[in-house]
Image (cartoon, helix red, strand yellow):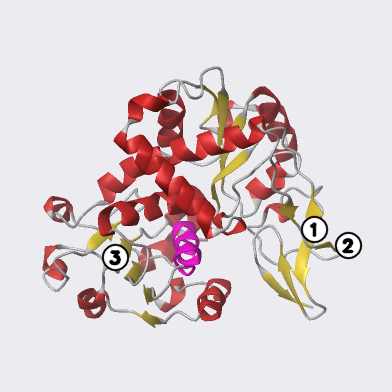
Amino acid sequence: MDITNKYLNLIDLNDYPVDWWLSLLERAHGIISEPEKYMESCKGKIMGTLFYEPSTRTQMSFQTAMLRLGGTIIGFDNPATSSVAKGENLKDTTKIVSGYADIMVMRHPLAGSVKAAALTAECPVINAGDGGHLHPTQTLTDLLTLKEEKGTLEGLTIGLCGDLKNGRTVHSLIKAMSCFKNNRFILISTKELSLPVYIKDILSASGLDFKEVQSLDDAMPELDVLYMTRIQQERFASKEDYLAQKGFYILDRKKLEAAKHDLVVLHPLPRVDEIAMEVDDDERALYFKQAKYGMYVRMALILTMLESKDKGRSLPLVIGRKHKGISCSNPGCITNHELYLPRYFKGNESLLVCEYCDERRLV
């Protein structure tokens, strides 16, 4: 069923048709070309930023985007400095802040948290990353970078390397790029950090070719795009588990010798040691430029969502059936921490999929 919500929300990019994504990219291109035209577009508007996790690029690019549009900002970048530290639940925090702001941007360590917040928020909500689940505005950043730098979103061989299990940027990008024709994916990771099954199912359903490999060196000559990711210490149960995976993949100048001359190297950042500093001087290394593209696409997104709010347009939150007595099997799902939340699942009598975090559960 659908839960009626007054506003457009960006929880999962795949909630919207591809034409909507492309219109955002076109708008972002226009902002890049003539930024002065948009300087007063959000005058009098307030954006609330709720960052329960540390962030540099995502948080600052959203803030800069709103300021360049003429708006202002409220919020926090550390829950320890808010009433969250006193035990305030997610609903109460987001309900209050969304009442102050015209639009709200949220990052949270638990999967499904932003969708949970959007159920009761009083303004449009943008997902700035929910645990290891999704990161739709990073995906818009990646799409804009590829569109501007490669000139197409089709027919690309895309290598994704590193933590494919916990990498929300990877999950979102694969879901998006599987919507474009003739793309091919090479998944480069250790077995322990391989792509979740539900994302592989999306690739299989799309009919696009993909393969899983463990060697970055072997994959390099085939790639049009290399998407590097860091091994995320915060997603591991122990430091020992993290250290066992850290440093397994490092892109350096020697590996680039086998790559195409027009390869595009991307990274959502921050990096730790997975890209050597010497690579920064290679013209194929576009991760710093990629971060700047993120500001422009977030400007386009803010404008689009605020215009929809002003015009009374909404997008219902798609929610499955409510199930009493059944919990999500993902310990990192928001429903296992904010226990007042209703448990919603889609699927059938034998297989349920959590509507918040996409975790599967056999019944």
Q: Circle 3 sits in a helix, a strand or a loop, which is it?
A: strand
Residue 284 quadrant: bottom left
User: For residue 324, which numbered disc appears in the image?
Assistant: 2
What amino acid type is highlighted by mark number 2? Lys
Q: Circle 1 sits in a helix, a strand or a loop, which is it?
A: loop
Q: Which residues are magenta?
A: 165-179
Would you name the residue on which mark 1 appears? 343
Would you name the residue on which mark 3 appears? 226
114 relative to 333, above or below: above
Q: Circle 2 sits in a helix, a strand or a loop, which is it?
A: loop
Question: Can you give x and y, in whole percent of width and height, for residue 270 in the image?
Answer: 34, 48
Q: Is residue 177 magenta?
A: yes
Mark 2 / mark 3, whichever is N-terminal? 3
Tell me what residue is drawn at x 45 percent, y 79 percent: 208
Q: Depth-wise, is mark 3 or mark 1 nearer the camera?
A: 3
97 relative to 322, above or below: above
Q: Is residue 92 magenta?
A: no
Mark 3 / mark 1, whichever is N-terminal? 3
Tell me what residue is drawn at x 67 percent, y 33 percent: 311
In this rendering, position of residue 243 left or right of residue 321: left
Q: Is residue 57 visible?
A: no
User: For residue 41, which numbered disc appears in the image?
Assistant: none
